[in-house]
Image (cartoon, grey):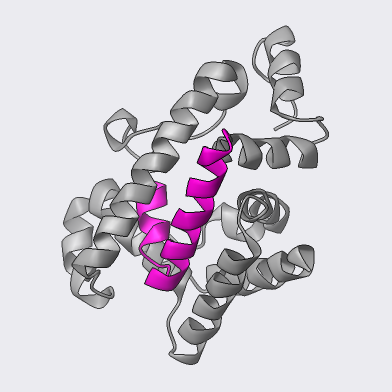
Amino acid sequence: MPESLIHTIITAEWDMFQHVRNQGGRASCQDDYDTFAIMRKSQFLSWSHEALASYRQDLTEARAAGRNLLTEKYGYMMEHTAPEEYENIRSLLPAVPPEKAALVAGLTEKEVLWREDFNRRFPDYGRLGRPLRKEDAACGETSIETYAMGELNTYSERTLKLLAAHYQKLEAQGENPAVRIMDATARQYGYRDSADAQARLAQEGGHHGF
């Protein structure tokens, strides 16, 4: 069931992604379904079934209302990646009420801290990803912090609360959700897990197969 649910979500997201309009024209990543699917599946494999079902409902409701959650995600991200342009589109984005903003801020910080821990444990593999915080990002780069904030802002409060509860449970069990995500990514690129990817990347000077 989770695999089919994840496939349904990725299909809905990919359709929305195809309708995202960029200032410079269509982005190359909009023609790269394989990478899109790998990255999204890796993330969703770390979620609970309840959170996945809730997010699928978010996507269904958004589509019925004529909203594109992927367009909104990149719009929210522009607050940090393109602040001047963001001011021009700010009024077009759904307002984020205080309770939801607090949930988004808390989960965003958790995602950054999990990835910081991951990068300490698997430095060569971790180095292949985005910069951690918005102040670490060069011009044209999107940090993990900014990306997480943008995406989480598109989830319903229901989905955010389910995710927060699930992540709290994982942390109580001593798990780092970022490791789950990166393990899943590594497996889809032919490695056993993050430790295997790290060992092989270190051996080959930090560049291999991703």
Q: Is residue 9 found inside the magenta-colored segment of the image?
A: no
In the picture, which quadrant includes the C terminus? top right
Stretch of the chain drawn in magenta? 147-174
Main secondary-structure element of the magenta-colored stretch: helix
Instruction: Using the image, determine if residue 109 lies above or below residue 119.
Output: below
Residue at 33% across, 31% down: 138
Residue 142 appears in the picture as rendered: no
Give the image location of residue 78, x and y in percent.
29, 55
Q: Which residue is drawn at 47% across and 34% down?
A: 114
Residue 95 at what x, y percent from top left? 23, 73
Q: Does the magenta stretch include residue 162?
A: yes
Residue 105 location, x and y as percent?
29, 51
Query: Can see residue 82?
Result: yes
- Position of 192 compared to 97: left or right? right
Compared to residue 52, the image places residue 66 above or below, namely below
Q: Eyeballing the image, is 176 above or below 15? A: above
Task: Kindly identify the residue that appears in the image at 63 percent across and 56 percent down.
Answer: 44
Which residue is painted at 53% across and 48% down in the image?
169
The answer to which of 150 and 174 lies nearer the viewer is 174
